[in-house]
Image (cartoon, helix red, strand yellow):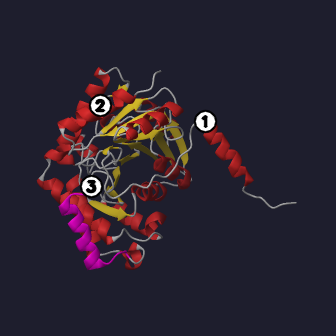
């Protein structure tokens, strides 16, 4: 008998191909002529000379890598400086920087809950939140999307220690969570509220201070935020923000912090450079929102099924997974990169093109983007 323990992978591959769900890596060159509406570089900072210089300076001073976990050799004065400025900018008492936004969500959910807890999670939350809920060992209740009343009823039925978790801006359709209502429910039911502000930081709030700042909730009792440094700040990494005692608890208990190598100094330097640039140029946040609104209005005027954006993500629905893949490929052939979301990335099963607005897009580029999407749209 032959030994073939991975033959099942071939069957899975065939099923993915039949469903139009094959994913492939496409390494991009350093320079490209493609109009980029696929990345999460909302403020156009990832290639900004000041940001890349900050990354290079940090690498020269601190080295190419962090050299160890944050609790051993991986913490530098640069990490501490970034944490202080992130907390101050976003309106929280303290911050903790991790190697990714994914790691930040896992850290917060696993360290702040446990077996005797209930986590109430929005049905459209990011995969990192879903995985954090699973790893927490807490009971998890998934409630309908953006439904504070469903959160209230679920918390009331539990009666014990609980935490509600939501994205601030959902990555598929770009709609915002009803944060004020959710915070009110959590206060009334004595539950904590965890908000992933990955798509809000740099776009929402005064000068891009984030969705919690925009809702007047930053720094509030019982509120913790996670975010990523890889979108508006154009770098890499993630962070948890909240009361100092929460951050101290994570330092001592969060496994994705304790057992992971610290964020590379270049990434920390780049994020700090972006944050300081955003302080000086707060208009970038408003420009990103303006670009997103312009894309939405022009796409809907052309008869396409776009979803009104609350931040910088513009979603355009496709008739099928195969159609979405072909549509994205046709856009690329026409000179523009766009995102393509298909199951299982979309919780409702509806495939989409995902366009990301950038603060540095010109009006001419906006018009070009809309023309390409319209010209390549599949026939329903």
Badge number at residue 19? 1
Q: Nearer the viewer, mark 2 or mark 3?
A: 2
Q: Earlier in the sequence, mark 1 or mark 3?
A: 1
Residue drawn at x 72%, y 56% as measured from the top left: 6
In the image shown, does 300 or 163 lie closer to the viewer?
300
> Is 154 drawn above or below residue 300 in the view shown?
below
Residue 374 left/right relative to 9: left
Residue with the mark numbered 2: 370
Q: Nearer the viewer, mark 1 or mark 3?
A: 1
What x and y, as percent, mark residue 76?
Answer: 30, 75
Location of the N terminus (image quadrant): bottom right
Q: Earlier in the sequence, mark 2 or mark 3?
A: 3
Q: CA distance from mark 2 to mark 1?
A: 28 Å
Start-end of magenta stretch: 47-66
In the image shown, does 302 or 97 lie closer to the viewer?
302
Q: Say what secondary structure mark 3 lies in.
A: loop
Q: Nearer the viewer, mark 2 or mark 1?
A: 2
Residue drawn at x 43%, y 43% as measured from the top left: 164
Residue with the mark numbered 3: 233
Magenta-colored stretch includes residue 55: yes
Q: Earlier in the sequence, mark 2 or mark 1?
A: 1
Residue at the farthest right position? 1
Residue drawn at x 43%, y 66% as measured from the top left: 257
What x and y, as percent, mark residue 201?
Answer: 27, 48
What x and y, as percent, mark residue 336?
Answer: 34, 41
């Amino acid at each position: 008998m032959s030994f073939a323990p991975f033959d099942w992978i071939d069957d899975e591959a065939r099923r993915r191909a039949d469903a139009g769900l094959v994913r492939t890596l496409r390494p991009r060159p350093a320079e490209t002529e493609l109009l980029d509406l696929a990345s999460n570089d909302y403020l156009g900072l990832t290639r900004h000379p000041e940001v890349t210089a900050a990354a290079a300076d940090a690498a020269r001073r601190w080295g190419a890598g962090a050299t160890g976990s944050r609790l051993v050799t991986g913490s530098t004065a640069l990490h501490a400086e970034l944490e202080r400025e992130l907390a101050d900018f976003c309106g929280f008492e303290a911050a903790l920087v991790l190697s990714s936004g994914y790691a930040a969500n896992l850290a917060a959910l696993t360290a702040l809950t446990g077996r005797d807890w209930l986590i109430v999670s929005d049905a459209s939350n990011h995969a990192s939140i879903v995985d954090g809920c699973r790893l927490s060992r807490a009971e998890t209740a998934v409630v309908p999307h953006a439904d504070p009343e469903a959160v209230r009823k679920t918390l009331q039925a539990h009666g014990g220690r609980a935490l509600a978790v939501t994205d601030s801006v959902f990555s598929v359709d770009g709609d915002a969570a009803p944060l004020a209502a959710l915070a009110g429910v959590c206060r009334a039911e004595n539950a904590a509220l965890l908000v992933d502000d990955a798509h809000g930081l740099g776009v929402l709030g005064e000068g891009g201070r984030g969705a919690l700042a925009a809702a007047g909730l930053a720094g509030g009792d019982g509120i913790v935020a996670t975010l990523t440094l890889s979108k508006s700040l154009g770098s890499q990494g993630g962070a948890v923000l909240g009361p100092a005692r929460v951050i101290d608890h994570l330092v001592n208990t969060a496994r994705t912090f304790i057992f992971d190598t610290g964020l590379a100094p270049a990434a920390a330097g780049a994020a700090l450079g972006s944050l300081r640039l955003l302080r000086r140029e707060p208009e970038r946040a408003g420009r990103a929102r303006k670009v997103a609104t312009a894309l939405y209005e022009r796409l809907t005027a052309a008869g396409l099924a776009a979803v009104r954006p609350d931040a910088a993500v513009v979603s355009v629905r496709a008739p099928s997974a195969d159609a979405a893949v072909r549509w994205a490929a046709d856009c690329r052939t026409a000179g523009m990169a766009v995102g393509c979301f298909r199951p299982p990335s979309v919780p409702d099963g509806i495939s989409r093109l995902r366009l990301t607005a950038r603060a540095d897009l010109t009006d001419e580029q906006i018009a070009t983007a809309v023309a390409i999407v319209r010209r390549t749209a599949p026939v329903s």
